[in-house]
Amino acid sequence: MRKGILSLVIVAATFLLITGCVTTGSETTTVAETTTMPEKASQAGPMSQTVGIGPGGFHESCEDEWKVGDTIKCSFTSSNPVVFNVHYHDAKDVKHYSVEDILTDDFSDSFTVQNNDVHCGMWQNNSGTFVKLTYEIEMVKK
């Protein structure tokens, strides 16, 4: 009987993990998430992260260390197309920055920081399925 219950629990947990109802590590499902770059103080190269985004959800990664003149290299791949933009927040509203909303599953580009406001990359999952997103961001000081 114990083996049967244990097998059922394993099957159920596997199903929930595959469908995106359970997260592990840095994955996110339908809950909106904003993160700051991990380990930015000790970052010696590109920062890479993999997250999950549930249907209708989004992932936002913000950075307050970028200064005018810094070049930012950004790339990502996702299991389904996502709407991506890079914007900054000022005291009044959200303003889109270097990258306007684009729908893609593969992106690679760079831009130069034009002001000292907090900048954010945002990935919106408008599909009806769970999306796996892997992104890399690298800052090159001026």
Image (tube, rainbow, N blue to C red):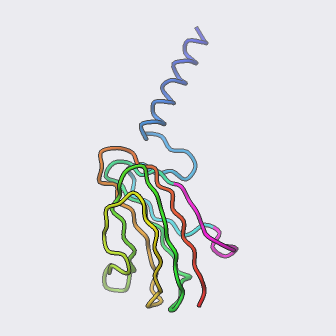
Vertical placement of residue 7 versus 117, above or below? above
Vertical placement of residue 113 versus 24, above or below? below
Q: Position of residue 116 (x, y in %)?
A: 48, 89
In this rendering, position of residue 48 left or right of residue 58: right
- State yes or no: residue 44 in magenta: yes
In this rendering, position of residue 25 left or right of residue 33: right
Quarter that holds the N terminus: top right
Residue pictured at 30% horizontal, 45% vertical: 128
Residue pictured at 53% horizontal, 69% vertical: 36
- State yes or no: residue 41 in magenta: yes
Q: Which of the 4 quarters of the picture holds residue 39? A: bottom right
Residue placed most toward the observer, 100 or 115? 100
Vertical placement of residue 29 versus 67, above or below? above
The secondary structure that dominates the magenta segment is loop
Q: Position of residue 119 (x, y in %)?
A: 45, 78
Count of numbered tags:
0
Vertical placement of residue 127 versus 9, above or below? below
In this rendering, position of residue 25 left or right of residue 54: right
Q: Position of residue 50 (x, y in %)?
A: 53, 55
Quarter that holds the C terminus: bottom right
In this rendering, position of residue 115 left or right of residue 82: right
Which residue appears farthest toward the top when viewing the image?
Answer: 1
Q: Which residues are magenta?
A: 39-50
Q: Position of residue 29 (x, y in %)?
A: 42, 48
Q: Which of the 4 quarters of the picture holds residue 130? A: top left
